Image (tube, rainbow, N blue to C red):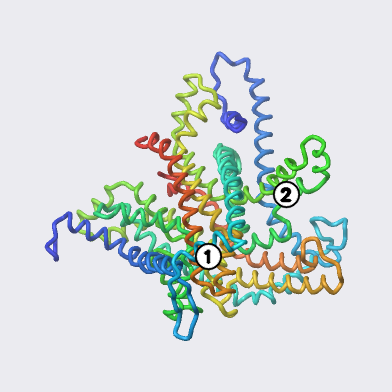
Amino acid sequence: MTTMKMRSLSEISIKSNAVLKHTAAKRARNIIGMAFYYFVLLSLSFVFVYPLLYIISKSLMRPEDVADATIRWIPKMFSLGNYKVAAEYLNYWPSLLNSVIISFGSAALQIISCSLIGYGFARYRFPGQTFWLAMVVFTFLVPPQTFVVPLFSFFLDLNWVNTHLPFVVPAVMGHGLKGALFVLIFIQFYRQLPNVLEEAARIDGAGAFRTYWGIMLPLAKPAMLVVFLFSVVWHWNDTFEPNLYLLVPEYFNLSQSMAFFNGIADVSSMQAASSTGASSAIGQAPTLQNQIMAGVMLTILPILLLYLFTQRYFVESVERTGIAGE
Amino acid sequence: MKNKLGLSMRGRHILEGYSFISLWIAGFLLFMAYPLGRSLYFSFNNMENSKNGLQATYVGMLNYRTAFSTDIDFLPLLKTTMTTMLTQVPLILIFAMFSALLLNGKIKGRTIFRGIFFLPVIIASGAVLKELLQQGAAQLPIFSQGDLEEKLSGLIPGNVLEQLLDYADSLTLVMWDSGVQILIFIAGLQTISPQLYEAAKMDGATKWESFWKITFPMITPMLFVNTLYSIVNMFTKADNKVMDYIVTQQVFQKNNFGYASALGWIYFCLIALVLAIVFVIFRRSLSATEGRG
């Protein structure tokens, strides 16, 4: 209820002549309403920025700062020592390269394939369409983990394990990580476009593919941006598939290396705990925690930058793609 | 117009349509249908890793019976996942709708706020979320700090209080999980014509009434999409224990392919059941909004 009230207050009130004398009181209420509105927004924003602040603050602390009880957020002396250690453990540059290859490669392929498939579903009527559309939804709903065993042995038979092919080939065919969702986004987008453009192109003698490539695809930029960003981010953070198909450290991406690093840290903290007889409340020695947070920061920094530059267009695009439709 | 194959207009249309989606169908057969079929076959067999590859021995329903009788870990994990799902999905939906309404207003800096609300999707997922959870950073200090528990213990009976605090603790996770849903709701809110609100206002409707009579019915489809999305996300996200159990325990440590497949199928049936219930609940309200402008 408060939400709606606040929205009403945020709109500039329409002055009708009958209520002129209430205007002053209304303005005062408006200001209070706006203040409350921003208060709610800001405090919610804090919850969302909190993990980032936590990561940055912890990662910059030195061992002395951790021990110092007066320090909660801002370390007295900034130090990049944690980052150095973390970068070493993460095997940073090779892992980063692997992450970039997998995320951006798969995302680019998924844009091309899912857009093509989405177009076919959205603009053509053919027998069996309902069935295949249902299969797309089905693919989206089935968790990949349920059939991972045979898929793994399938890739093993094909000798695709420890190559990038388990990511590339499904992506080319409009599958891969959340591929079905991306197809659905494109279907939704192409459905909104008017028919006249295609008809004009066809009358001018363009074939089916040319119409798609020359006329419809350039219009799909908002949908492409949304799919691209989603795909990059999800591939970047995904450890499940890389853990299955990329088993040697040379192929590890950042998220995998991060998990690996965390594993090492766990073991060494357990050793430390058992040798001193003390057990840390959270299970890790404080300095290790900071090194891990530095590693986390290094892991998310590239996509954070990407998001920083694209988020404006991204949020606008989501509105225009009609993701929500239906 | 050239017509190489001598097809009618309709025939050509169908052929073109199929050639656009043929890539997907091929992928579906290779990466969905085939592995799904194989895993169903695996689940009725005992798979042995031998020199000449996997050896299957038919065991009937044994794997399924084991999951429900002998396996002491699986059912509790399943139960935990279900309770988390049931408690968190409604919270996520309510919170996402609330945030979307907040962010939909014409306010200064709303692009920035929207960017911030979506931030956790970028950072607090997958491996990173695991680290944050491990360090206890996924809980708001407000609830753990101070002596909230002591202060409240006089007012609320102990076990109820404990559950309430647990619930409060999970709020951060709920908020971090709702980024995508907020975006979907905002996109939905944008499609509602302002004229509807004006008309309602003229007729003397309060904001509260116009929310329930206009906004809510108009975004029911998005609510449906979001419910599906949240449920699927809950069941498959990185910190889900059942997934971990199936994959790590059964596949990599014990090499128990047949049993892991059976567990996967049980899990899948459960998800399908939940989704079917959601479909039934939404069917009536969805058909009511169908055919709107």
Q: CA distance from mark 2 to mark 1?
A: 28 Å
Residue drawn at x 68%, y 25% as measured from the top left: A28
Q: Is residue A87 above or below residue A123?
A: below
Q: Which mark is residue A272?
A: none
**Circle 1 crowding by C-alpha within 10 Å: few under 14, some 14–19, many from 20:** many
Q: Chain of mark 1?
A: A
**Residue hosting label 1:** A235
Q: Position of residue B109 (x, y in %)?
A: 60, 43
- Residue drawn at x 77%, y 36% is B156
Q: Residue at x 51, y 53 (%)?
A: B232
> Does residue B163 show up?
yes
In the image, A268 versus B249, the foreground residue is: B249
Which quadrant holds the N terminus of chain A? Answer: top right
Q: What residue occupies the far bottom of the structure in this picture?
A: B51
Find residue B253 and report its image quarter: bottom right
Front-lying residue, B67 or A87: B67
User: In x, y percent, where is residue B166?
Assistant: 71, 47
According to the image, label 2 marks what residue?
A: B140
The residue lying toward the viewer, choosing from B227 and B212, is B227
| Residue A182 picture quarter | bottom left
- Residue type (three-letter) at the residue carrying disc 1: His
Where is A157 relative to B213, above or below?
below
Residue type pointed to by label 2: Leu
| Residue A305 visible in this rendered orientation of the protein | no
Residue A250: % across, % down: 58, 80
Label 1: element kind: helix
